[in-house]
Image (spheres, rainbow, N blue to C red):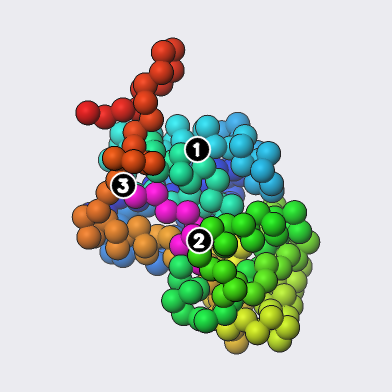
Amino acid sequence: MMRLHLVNPNSTHAMTEQVGRAARRVAATGTVIDLGNPPDTPASIEGYYDEAMAVPAMLAAIRAAEARGAQAHVIACFDDPGLSAAREVAGGPVIGICQAAIQVAMTLASRFSIVTTLPRSVPIIEDLADAYGAGRRCRRVRAIDLPVLALDEDPATARRLLAAEIRAARAQDGAEAVVLGCAGMAELCDWLAAETGVPVIDGVTAAVKQAEAIIGMGYRTAKTGAYAWPRAKRGGLCCEVA
């Protein structure tokens, strides 16, 4: 049996349940997925401030999940907030859904675009795509100009806008595949692919399958360099493991 911890860094329970359904749909038989939804974090993550406010509670949730036996962790936010810090506090692999989706996209297509929610997220995701080595293969990051929570509150509008942007990505960007740039879009992936005829990649499912593969190979996070356990500080939490 494998035990994965899927943590939604925002405090919206309905979104956590939605990404949990998407994850469990593709998980292998025998994989247990525990959902994490830290309280007292922003209702949605839409910018650097929201990321910063969400990370401490997310890291605490990851440490707690490790203590309960989690073998790997998936951060279910496309900004991959606190990913490097999470890899410091976790012994098992930590997968960000943006990194996972981009890696899948670069395997399946020579050129791809990303469709996200608000325009303010575009430069954040552009920087992530560059950091993850996508370069010119990521043709464009597009936004439907709809808040994250509206994906659940107004699904008909979300579907219409997403389908239109995916078609535009194919026609205008030369995109051969499209990545969904928000965890809240996970359950729309199959419908959008069928509706547009474009391969559509969801980071939640991509990250779950990557986590299963890494666990299956017996790998854990390196602890001799950048991802070493955080050093104990006077008056602070001790995360070091001998």
Q: Which residues are magenta?
A: 91-102
Residue type indicated by callout 3: Thr
Q: Is residue 145 magenta?
A: no
Q: Estimate the x, y position of residue 96 in percent, counting from the top left.
A: 47, 54
Callout in the foreground (3, 1): 3
Q: Is residue 227 above or below residue 139?
A: above
Q: Nearer the viewer, residue 45 or 39?
A: 45
Kindly identify the residue that appears in the image at 69 percent across and 46 percent down: 47
Is residue 172 visible in this depiction of the protein? yes
Q: Earlier in the sequence, mark 3 or mark 1?
A: 1
Q: Position of residue 226 (x, y in %)?
A: 39, 41
In contact (CB < 8 Å): disc 3 and disc 1: no
Give the alpha-carbon distance from disc 1 to disc 2, as whole Å.
22 Å
Is disc 1 placed on a helix, strand or loop?
helix
Pointer 2 with pointer 3, Cβ within 8 A:
no
Indicate yes or no whether the magenta region holds residue 94. yes
Residue 204 can be seen, yes or no: no
The residue that disc 2 covers is 132
Q: Secondary structure at mark 2?
A: loop
Q: Amino acid at mark 2?
A: Tyr
